[in-house]
Amino acid sequence: MTGKERIRKAFLCEQTDRVPWVPFVGCHAGALIGHDASSYLKSAELIEQGVRKAVDLYRPDGIPVMFDLQVEAEALGCRLEWASQNPPAVSTHPLANGMSLEDLH
């Protein structure tokens, strides 16, 4: 059974030969290719390289390209504080500075 088949069957609540393994490597993928979290998460090229490296090393059934809730927060107008060892932290709220729900796109 391939990883894709295993994941598909699991989503359909069908029998699989084992539990699918789909690790969230996040910033660790950046470390695998020698880059800090901030540089890694700001570069599509580095994200691709890091995810490919994680796939080569860990041979998972599947792997998320990106799992970072800060992406959604930033899209809604929140400010992010970037760090070298962690994903960014959300430092503002879009409604805290006088915006209304109607102002959000």
Image (tube, grey):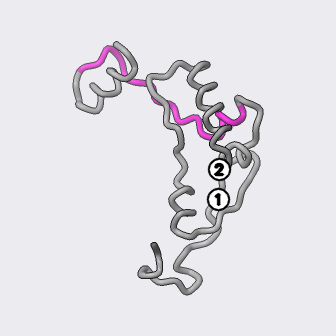
Q: Which quarter of the image is occupied by the C terminus?
A: bottom left
Residues packed near mark 1 inside 10 Å, few (<14), some (14 to 19) or many (20 plus): some
Residue under circle 2?
87
Report how far apart the C-alphas of labels 1 and 2 lie in the structure.
Answer: 7 Å
Residue contact at pointers 1 and 2, CB within 8 angstroms: yes
Please tell me whether mark 2 sits on a helix, a strand or a loop: loop
The circle on residue 38 is none
Give residue 78's position: percent from left, percent from top: 58, 68
- Residue drawn 43% across the image and 79% down it: 101
Placement of 65 over or under 83, stated as above or below: above
Q: Amino acid at mark 1?
A: Ala
Give residue 32's position: percent from left, percent from top: 70, 29
User: Is 19 left, or right, of 96 in this rendering?
Assistant: left
- Residue drawn 61% across the image and 19% down it: 57
Does the magenta run of residues contain 29? yes
The circle on residue 89 is 1
Q: Which quarter of the image is occupied by the N terminus?
A: top left
Q: Nearer the viewer, residue 85 or 78?
A: 78
Which residue extends farthest bottom?
Answer: 98
Q: Which stretch is magenta?
A: 15-31
The chief SS type of the magenta part is loop
Q: Amino acid at mark 2?
A: Pro
